């Protein structure tokens, strides 16, 4: 696998080596020792989640506060999304900066997002199946988020031929300047 550190330190795009022939394809999507070596420390994933969403669904920007914070390894197994990670570590030189990467069933890319980041994605295809590993179990009492369209962050979401679909919860997140961050 090819590990490409992004402009925000600690965030990596991971590109697998895909072996394809007339029967289909094969690739390793995760290998613990190789992952730890490239990331630079051990990350023990304890839960894996999957969601299915239609075009225009925007999920995020979510994170878990305090001891419940989560590192994530995300990928798309069907369709395509624009995946976004926002640095919400106050002491970071890239606080408030984001990384946006298209993940799709065609490019097989994954994105590693360390603790201290808000995360979200926008579905670009008619449907997307999104899966992610986390290194801490979900804790409802630690659930938090920031607004997907916060002007301080300035995420350049692509224009689609449909309206964005957000959960009620995702329309009520605070702006970054008002959020409880790391």
Image: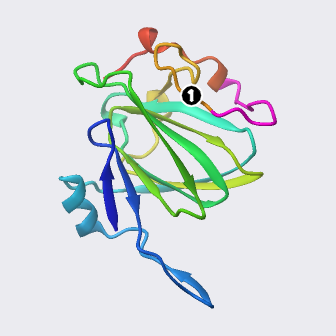
Q: Residue at x 79, y 30 (%)?
A: 163
Residue 144 spot, x, y in % from top left: 48, 25
Q: Which colour scheme is used?
A: rainbow
- Are there few (<14), some (14-19), or many (20+) residues within 10 Å of tag 1? few
Residue 134 spot, x, y in % from top left: 41, 50
Residue 30's image quarter? bottom left
Q: Is residue 56 above or below residue 26?
A: above
Q: In which quarter of the image is the N terminus?
A: bottom left
Residue 60's image quarter? top right
Residue 176's image quarter? top left
Q: Is 170 left or right of 35, judged from the image as shown?
A: right
Residue 153 spot, x, y in % from top left: 46, 20
| Residue 162 counted in the magenta span | yes
Q: Residue furthest bottom?
A: 22
| Residue 75 counted in the magenta span | no
Q: Is 119 left or right of 169, judged from the image as shown?
A: left
Q: Mark 1 points at which residue?
A: 156
Q: Which residue is drawn at 61% across and 47% down?
A: 81
Judge by depth and name the residue closer to the eye, 160 or 40: 160
| Secondary element at tag 1 | loop
Q: In which quarter of the image is the C terminus?
A: top left
Magenta-colored span: 158-169
Q: Residue furthest top?
A: 178
Question: What is the total number of numbered labels drawn onto the structure image?
Answer: 1
Q: Residue at x 56, y 28 (%)?
A: 156
Q: Is residue 126 above or below residue 181?
A: below
Q: Which residue is drawn at 74% across and 31% down?
A: 164
Q: Is 1 left or right of 126, judged from the image as shown?
A: left
Q: Is the magenta stretch mostly helix, strand or loop?
A: loop
Residue 64 spot, x, y in % from top left: 42, 32
């Amino acid at each position: 696998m090819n590990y490409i550190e992004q402009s925000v330190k600690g965030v990596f795009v991971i590109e697998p080596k895909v072996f394809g022939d007339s029967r289909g394809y094969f690739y390793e999507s995760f290998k613990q020792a190789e992952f730890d070596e490239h990331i630079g420390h051990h990350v023990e994933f304890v839960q894996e989640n999957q969601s299915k969403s239609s075009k225009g669904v925007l999920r995020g920007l979510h994170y878990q506060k305090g001891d419940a914070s989560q590192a994530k390894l995300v990928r798309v197994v069907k369709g395509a999304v624009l995946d976004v990670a926002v640095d919400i570590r106050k002491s970071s030189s890239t606080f408030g900066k984001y990384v946006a990467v298209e993940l799709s069933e065609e490019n097989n890319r994954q994105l590693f997002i360390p603790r201290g980041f808000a995360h979200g994605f926008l579905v670009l295809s008619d449907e997307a199946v999104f899966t992610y590993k986390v290194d801490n179990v979900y804790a409802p009492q630690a659930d938090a988020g920031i607004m997907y369209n916060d002007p301080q962050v300035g995420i350049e979401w692509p224009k689609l031929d449909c309206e964005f679909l957000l959960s009620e919860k995702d329309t009520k997140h605070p702006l970054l300047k008002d959020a409880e961050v790391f």
